[in-house]
Amino acid sequence: TLSDRLGAIFTNLRGKGRLSPQDIDATCREIRIALLEADVALPVVRGFIGRIKERATGAEVSAALNPAQQIIKIVNEELVAILGGETRRLRFAKNPPTVILLAGLQGAGKTTLAGKLALWLRNQGHAPLLVACDLQRPNAVTQLQVVGQQAGVQVYAPEPGNGVGDPVAVARDSIRHAQVKQHDVVLVDTAGRLGVDAELMQQAADIRDAVSPDEILFVVDAMIGQDAVATAEAFQAGVGFTGVVLTKLDGDARGGAALSVRHVTGQPILFASTGEKLADFDTFHPDRMASRILGMGDMLSLIEQAEQVFEADEAEAMAAKLVGNDFTLDDFLQQMMMIRKMGPIGGLLGMLPGAGQMKEALAGVDDRDIDRTAAIIQSMTPGERQDPKIINSSRRQRIAKGSGSTVAQVNALVDRFFEARKMMQSMAGKFGLPGARSNRK
Ligand code: GDP
Ligand code: MG
């Protein structure tokens, strides 16, 4: 999969101090293959690779990140951009009802989506009406009624026994019904075919003209891969749409469809469907999808946090200390404060690759520990903080008294400091922390 392939590339990059043009070329080649394998359309891949290469070659040097992390960051940012940048919200009509038309192939998940969207809207205080305009399949109306019942919303459907209904008339009548019954959103479910078909397009276009929708959502199964592009283009030409909904993202869809559809049609992805149950549904977040495609969610949050917290100078200075032996108790305290700024300690350390040892060393450290640690360190003389080796037992007693802690707590802190110093020196070398880089220069 795309995630696996990219993961392998980035593992190879992790140990590098600096990226050569050859590294960048090789990386881009791998990313290109990965994207093509994930069914991303060729023009999309070309544009994407072009931008990655340009940015990776450019002088974007960050003190907080090593080169592999920088590439991951660039790839991620470009993925987010391709997927639409910000989340686009549903547009509501100034004069209700807001009309939303669902279009897409048979089996794409339109009827299921109608129920999900209805429930989602209801939970936000709207009073949606579901409209059954799929009169093609015998069970379609019943299916929508079941879904409506589950979502706790009304369903507008043609009276049974009236022969084959006319979906255009049903759609038109439903708007009047919604106005009378004070529904502020109308969700129109339509018929699909197994393939793109002129008659189907015409029917969808006729329904569109009858109800003048505020949003037309093209519903597409994320599992159909390359076919998504052709299908999206056909629907864009035949009916037109203002947004896309990706369904079946709970399967092992490779994400290529999302990238291509958004790029080829220029229309935003609004929602993501992730299962058969009504609750398996959410607004589409380009950043989350990008990190899913990358398969490096943890690494990405780490990068983000590292960038936020580490001022470049701070990081460089700290890095120099980490690799030398002049890491002091003051630095130890400063580092704990930085870690605190970065969020729950356990979560953060879990994200560092191979940080099991570090996690053990700091296990059970919480905010109260940090406060106590600060108190103890502040009760030390500058000389003691600079060179903790001089802290003998009489000094320990004095420090304990001064900070309102026990001698055992002071002992534990001093032990932990020496352990942490050892750990960080070895980590700086292993994981390409900024210190390792400046060391190699
Ligand atoms: P329609 O023909 O476009 O109305 O599609 P349906 O809503 O009838 O869905 C077709 C099938 O896909 C049904 O069996 C649904 O339960 C299933 N389905 C719809 N959305 C999802 C989803 O997000 N994930 C999974 N796993 N199944 C889905
Ligand atoms: Mg249906």
Image (cartoon, rainbow, N blue to C red):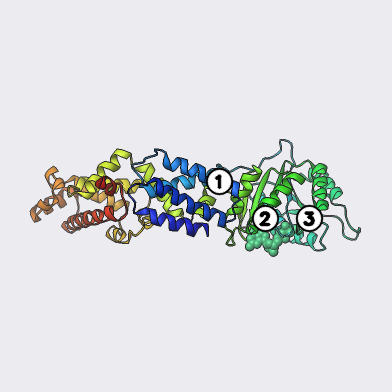
**Earlier sequence position, callout 2 versus callout 1:** 1
Say few, some or many: other residues with alpha carbon within 10 Å of mark 2 (under 14 / 14 to 19 / 20 or more).
Answer: some
**Earlier sequence position, callout 3 versus callout 1:** 1
Q: Quadrant of residue 274?
A: bottom right
Q: Which mark is drawn over residue 227? A: 2
Where residue 207 appears, as percent x and y from the top left, is 81, 46
Residue furthest toward the bottom? 139
Residue type (three-letter) at the residue carrying disc 2: Asp
Under 8 Å from ligand 2: the CB of mark 3?
yes
Of discs 3 and 1, which sits in the foreground?
1
- Residue in view at x 55 percent, y 46 percent: 46
**Earlier sequence position, callout 2 versus callout 3:** 3
Residue 347 visible in the snapshot: no
Say few, some or many: other residues with alpha carbon within 10 Å of mark 1 (under 14 / 14 to 19 / 20 or more).
Answer: few
Residue type (three-letter) at the residue carrying disc 3: Ala
Q: Which residue is mark 1?
A: 46
- Residue in view at x 71 percent, y 55 percent: 110
Under 8 Å from ligand 1: the CB of mark 2?
no
Of discs 2 and 3, which sits in the foreground?
2
Residue type (three-letter) at the residue carrying disc 1: Arg
Q: Which mark is drawn over residue 73? A: none
Where residue 385 appears, as percent x and y from the top left, is 16, 46
User: Of helix, strand and loop, which one carries label 1?
Assistant: helix
- Per the model, the C-alpha gap separating discs 3 and 1 is 36 Å
Q: Which residue is mark 3?
A: 191
Q: Is residue 96 left or right of residue 418?
A: right
Q: Circles 2 and 1: CB distance less than 8 Å?
A: no
Q: Quadrant of residue 406?
A: bottom left
- Per the model, the C-alpha gap separating discs 2 and 1 is 19 Å
Of discs 2 and 1, which sits in the foreground?
1
